[in-house]
Image (cartoon, grey):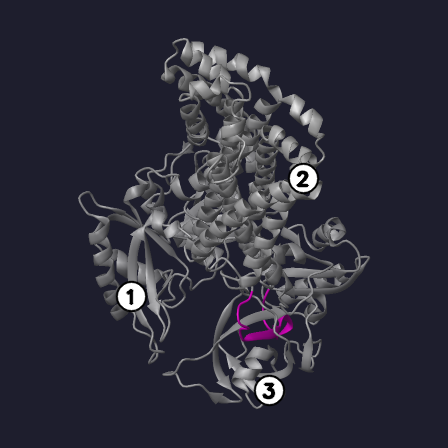
Amino acid sequence: MMPDFRVALRALARTPLSSAAAVLTLALGIGATTAIYGVVEATMLRALPWQGSDRLMDLSITVRPPNEETQAIVWSYPKFETMRSLQRSYEGVAAYTTQELLLSGGDGSERLRMELVSGNYFTLLRAPLALGRGLQPGDDTPQAAPVAVLSHALFMRRFGGDSSLIGRTIVLERDPVTVVGVAPAGFRGLSGEVALWAPISAAPRFSYPEILRERWNHSFDAVGRLRDGVSAASASAEMLALGRQVEAAHPLPEAGDGAVWGARAVTLREAREDASLSRSVLVLFGAVACVLLIACVNVANLLLARAAVRTREFAVRVAIGARRSQVAAQLLAETLLLSLTGGVLGILVASWSTEAVRTLVPASGGHLRTQTAQFLDLSAVRLDGRVLAFGLALSLVTGTLCGVVPALRASRPRLGEALKDGAGASSEGGLTFRRGRSRALLVTGNVALSLLLLVGAGLLSRSFAKARGVDAGFDARGVYTMRVQPPRDSMFAGSRATAFRTSLVSRLGALPGVTAVGTDECAPLSEECPGTIVLSVDGVALPESGARPSIGVHVVNDGYLKAVGGRLIAGRFLDARDREGAPMAAVINLAAAQRLFPRGDAVGKSIGIGFGAWNRAEIVGVIDNINYGAVGREPHAEFYGSYLQVTWGRGLYFMRTAGDPMQLAASARSAVRAESRDLAVYDERTLEQRAGSALGRIRFGAYLLGAFALLGLVLAIIGIYAALAYTVSLRTRELGIRMALGAVRREVVTLIMGRAMLLASVGAAVGLALAWGGARLLRGLVFGISATDPLTFATQTLLILLVCALAAYLPARRASRLDPVQALRSQ
């Protein structure tokens, strides 16, 4: 092939513009496809980062409420211990959960994410240590000295990689803890990005005293490693049986609400899958494959045109003895050179595209049950060896696909016709399904694939617009937010927690430009707010045997409603009167009022919930529904109580301002430091950014699919224009004769555009059929509209036809301005 490549290089150099056009077209198609393959590889194909991960199983409790689907939830620690003692399929099982805490010392307190784990956690995952040792079962006892293993990132950043740290103590939440090891670089644990690990027996110190004794507070994930010879199927069957035994060992403290409890075991890979995100990624991969096909169609069309122009050259070669396989190999060599060059440039495009994709990371959402699902973020997308190998293979395959048809046609010239003057004009000058059939099919395919992309992009774009337009009950404009976490010690406990919170709210409210300060545990649309059940309504206890309504709980201050832009419907909001020693007061939202007080007389009545001291509270107001769940979710019942009446130190602070909210960041942090250097500030964002993250999945699909649709449309326009321009150039003599015999310009334009629009109409019909058939893949990804929305299908079809008309009009207009005399002389 080397001689063929040398000849091919000289041939491509003689037509630099067409060669550059082919290379750039392939680079865009290959680059975009390689980038999205990197997303597929990172989220769906890459092996889990633990030795023998195919033997790791995710263990969970299942619950099926009446008339609902079965849900997987995490364990309470007593239930986990019961399961651990009964199971026989695993060589070991471990529990783990995450906790936010403060690391003291140095330049001040730093908030860290810690994983509390069973003593066999590192052994179970077969994780090597960079320094020291991992946690051991002996560390996981109440009598053991407190120890911890640090992440490699924390070890390097906070402690400068000082190996003498092993055996020394650090201060976590005022408690000295001995560092016994450092995890290897890149080890994140099962919960994602974790800064350190401590034994689960330390949970009462870092969380609350009863966490390991409460049977109905489900807080712990569980993982197990299968014994040798035990299959995943048999372990799953055993876990189904164990679910009934665990339920019998921990019966409901009341008659129950009719829910059916059990347990399940699935592979860790299956547990980390998110069907919605996987479908989004696969849809995007299909979309970018369409872009690549459009690029291939364009390049194949270009190669057909080049081959037609060189018809006499190939005929002469065959006439003087060249084998047809040699002619075909020559053209394939040219195509492979184009595709490999395009592939190299495509890798650069993929590198840039990967960085762009990382900025559109979809929020995982609070509905993901398992901690392992946090690995589904796209920050792990990178161009590693496998992705680069995919790009190289894609370049070779693309080159072969683009070049095979032109090579076969060029290798079978009709010698008698090809050696005449004007060769190619008669056979290739048409653009119908009888003459110029190959190019006609390519134009039709261009239109069909472009319409398929446009319909998908239109559906997701309309979904995104509708999601953004939903009234979630709050005003996110001009609000700066930050989380503040105090250490868990006596200085910030009990009444001191209330005093600290009051003082901090006052400091923040005094900052220049701040018009209102609110505080709560969570943000609207976050899907992470705490909740409980309703115990009584207007003094009447709800029966234990019935299904007690669930209700969200918000511990807020009197400025919260103004800070988030909520709306009061009846009564009043919480204020300074609702403090310690005063009657317990509450505000509920409209959804709770309509459900619990259907006659519309909620204000003045009472409600009791299973949270804090609000077992009986007077309802002083009703506010409009603020959505704290997923976008578009039906309003959920919500309860608002004053932080002055309970002990609640940590929180999320909202500061409304008339200017740029991010300009408050530095002064807000200074106000927190002035309150206490032991306070940690983190998660600083505007409320608009928080609301935007709730739209992450819809935005992710809409932006990327829209970008691919635009790219595909541009490539299609170029391809259609090039095909028609080439057709006009081949038909110059014919058009000159027509005009010499009396054809007017309008007739020439109508002739060319008529044939072009016929092909466009056929392509649009094929594209509509493909889009209609593929619409079911978008179900669950669209919001507020049907996946077969008629308006979207109609507008996108009209758009592609208008674009085709424009692409056809320019060559037709040029053809209509031909001088008949010059046209006849040119050939």
Specify the label residue 262 is tagged with: 1
Residue at screen point 70% across, 25% down? 822
Residue on which disc 2 sits: 743
User: Label 2: few (<14), some or many (≥20) within 10 Å?
Assistant: some
- In the rendering, which numbered label is found on residue 602? 3
Nearest to viewer (mark 3 / mark 2)? 2
Query: Of circles 2 and 1, which is in front?
Result: 2
How dense is the environment of label 1, judged by Cα within 10 Å: few (below 14), some, or many (20 and up)?
many
- With respect to residue 477, does 306 lie above or below? above
- Kindly report the distance in space between the C-alpha atoms of the residues bearing marks 2 and 1: 82 Å
Q: Secondary structure at mark 2?
A: loop
Residue appearing at x 50%, y 48% in the figure: 762
Q: Among all residues in the image, which is located at the extreme left?
A: 229
Q: Quadrant of the N terminus?
A: top left
788 vs 176, nearest the viewer? 788
* Residue at 75% across, 63% down: 506
Q: Going 60% across and 87% down the picture, which residue do you hit?
A: 602
